[in-house]
Amino acid sequence: MKTLKSTLLLLLALSIAIPMQAYDFKFEGICYKINSDGTTVYATYEQKGMPSYSFIPLEIDFPSKVTFGGKTYTVTAIGDSAFWGCDVIMSFTLSPTIKSIGDKAFYNCQGITSIYIPPTVREMGSEAFSVCKSLQYAYLNYTSLYMGWGLLKACTALESVTIGPNIERLNGFEFSGCTNLTSVICLRNKAPSIWDTSFYNLDTKNISVHAPLGCKSSYQSEFNGFHSVYEDLPAPSDKGDLNTDGKVNVSDVTALINIILGVL
């Protein structure tokens, strides 16, 4: 009986001392979990029950395909809390196969200064980029109709956000606590609807709104109480392709800045 009790205590101690894995395999430093279909995977955190990484690249280039055990899988998502608190991440790039970003996926990632979410992403989780306190610029060009509850909440360094043409509605608390926000750039021909809590506890008289040509009245109605509504953007020719190079990518961020600053 004593031997059995000692064995059970030893097993319990080992289970506490050695955190269980939350992933099935690693590829280039990132942890992945295999979906039930057996052909696709999503990025996740390292330890079960406590989102964290012992090591992670400074710059993450999420691939379309990963290989493990002689089998190739398609990467389709960034899972819930996948990179929670990973301060070392400076930037990331999403492959076209990634369709969703989970709740709090990059929550409290203090090293990220700018983000670009492409139109290939169709779902955005709640608080996906909350408390990223070094984040200054966000270009949200994904195809979901809704912004995502609390998406950029408490990103205190955020100065400018670009809302793509597919986003029709803000769900609430997206910019709560973004005390440095001064510019909202919208690419939609009709103003997205906003909730009273979307800019919770912010002085909207300090925030300017930039809209496409011919859309000012729609934006003035929806963004009532903001500093100014400027009708200074060209109508998006291809879901956010403002520099008309046939692509929608980070170069369009530069095009937006140049348009607003009046730089040819």
Image (cartoon, rainbow, N blue to C red):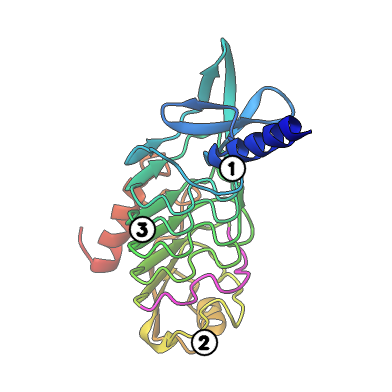
Image quadrant containing the C terminus: bottom left
From the image, tell me which residue sits under label 1.
Answer: 16
Residue 7 percent location from the top left of the image: 69, 31
Observer-nearest residue: 87 or 229? Answer: 87
Provide the residue span drawn in magenta. Answer: 167-179
Residue 209 percent location from the top left of the image: 42, 75
The residue lying at 20 percent from left, 61 percent from top is 263
Q: State if disc 1 and disc 2 touch (CB < 8 Å).
A: no
In the image, 34: left or right of 257? right
Separation of disc 3 and disc 1 at Cα?
29 Å
Residue 176 lies within the magenta run: yes
N-terminal-most mark, 3 or 2: 3
From the image, tell me which residue sits under label 3.
Answer: 110
Circle number at residue 38: none
Residue lying at the far front in this picture: please name it: 2
Dot 3 amino acid type: Gln
Observer-nearest residue: 158 or 169? Answer: 158
Disc number lying in front (3 or 2): 3
How many C-alpha atoms fall within 10 Å of the one at disc 2: few (<14), some, or many (≥20)? few
Disc number lying in front (3 or 1): 1
Residue 219 percent location from the top left of the image: 51, 77
Separation of disc 2 and disc 1 at Cα?
55 Å
Dot 1 amino acid type: Ile
From the image, tell me which residue sits under label 2.
Answer: 224
Please tell me whether the stretch drawn in magenta is mainly helix, strand or loop. Answer: loop
N-terminal-most mark, 3 or 1: 1
Dot 2 amino acid type: Asn
The residue lying at 46 percent from left, 39 percent from top is 94
Residue 20 percent location from the top left of the image: 59, 37
In the image, 185: left or right of 142? left
